[in-house]
Amino acid sequence: MSDSNSTDFINPSTFILLGIPGLEAAHVWISIPFCAIYAIALLGNFTILFIVKTEPSLHVPMYYFLCMLAITDLVLSTSILPKMLSIFWFYSREINFSACLTQMYFILSFFAIDSGILVAMAFDRYVAICDPLRHSTILTNPMVANIGLAVVLRGIILILPYPFLARRLPYCRTNIIPHTYCEHIAVVKLACADIRISSYYSLSMAFLFIGMDVSFIAVSYTQILRAIFRLPTKDARLKTFGTCGSHLCVILAFYIPHLFSALAQRFGHNVALHFHVLMANMYLLVPPMLNPIIYGVRTQQIRDRLLQPLLIKEPKVFSW
């Protein structure tokens, strides 16, 4: 009987997601801010997509990349929040093994796509400021589409080994995941086999996506700042730098929480588990909420289009 149970458990049909370990009694209360984050992310990103679609003046590369970012953020937050809320509200903790690996794949791939889009937006700002006369000839619509396709294919293909490496591992310890979603490390740690291949691949992909993307963004903004400081007047420098303000805020909102979570996971061995889980959720869920707010507040065209229905139109005066 024990041998049979052990054999069945090597490939578990389901995993159990605990939510936030240690804070189970507060799950309902914790769900309120998370639900608000999700609602704001949905409303904000769909609003961005609607405004850009209906406003012809926004049909330029900068806003095409912004739409790509909005779609990616919608998929990323939807990959996490519905299941998390079902755990918090309905105690629906079971998740099918294949569904778990699928969720893992979607989270990792769209996080990588998000990072790639930020690089593409940095390139757009670089061309617009450092070579403005050629901006329309370099970033044509086909070029924007090719960049978007390359970013998506990079995320889809390079993340594909994650679920396959996780599937081939034997799971004979437990099927309980102390997390709100199927995080890669939390899943493979349950395996009763050598996980070095998965760990090394994860480390190399982290270096590729985060390290290289941040490096490309840093190089772009180094050139942008050099071009800005060559401008003759302070007003011109401030106005030009202001065109990068929204993108810089989005970059900081995306990478800083992830860096903080990675450092806490690497060096915070004495930090409570629930803190690690909360941080792992925040760095994935906060940027999709903040991005449309940042662009809505800082971008004049989006702000004007958003406030247009609220403006009181003066009545027409007819002369006889």
Image (tube, grey):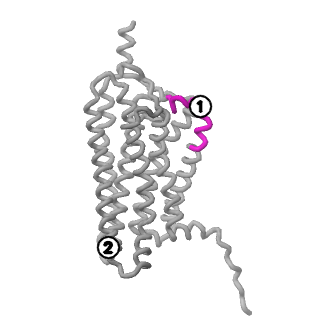
Q: Secondary structure at mark 1?
A: helix
Q: Residue at x 49, y 34 (%)?
A: 180
> For the C terminus, which image quadrant?
bottom right
Question: Mark 1 sits on what residue?
Answer: 90
Is residue 149 among the parts visible in the rendering? yes
Question: Mark 2 sits on what residue?
Answer: 227
Q: Which residues are magenta?
A: 18-33
How far, Cα to Cα, is label 2 from label 1?
55 Å
Q: Is 230 located above or below residue 19 in the figure? A: below
Q: Which quadrant of the structure image shows residue 92? A: top right
Callout 1 crowding tier (Cα within 10 Å): few <14, some 14–19, many ≥20: few
Q: Is 156 on the left-hand or right-hand side of 44?
A: left
Q: Residue at x 35, y 29 (%)?
A: 188
Q: Which quadrant of the structure image shows residue 172? A: top left
Q: Give the label on residue 152, or none.
A: none
Query: Is mark 2 in CB contact (under 8 Å) with mark 1?
Result: no
Q: Residue at x 41, y 39 (%)?
A: 264
Residue 176: percent from the left, percent from the top?
45, 24
Q: Secondary structure at mark 2?
A: helix
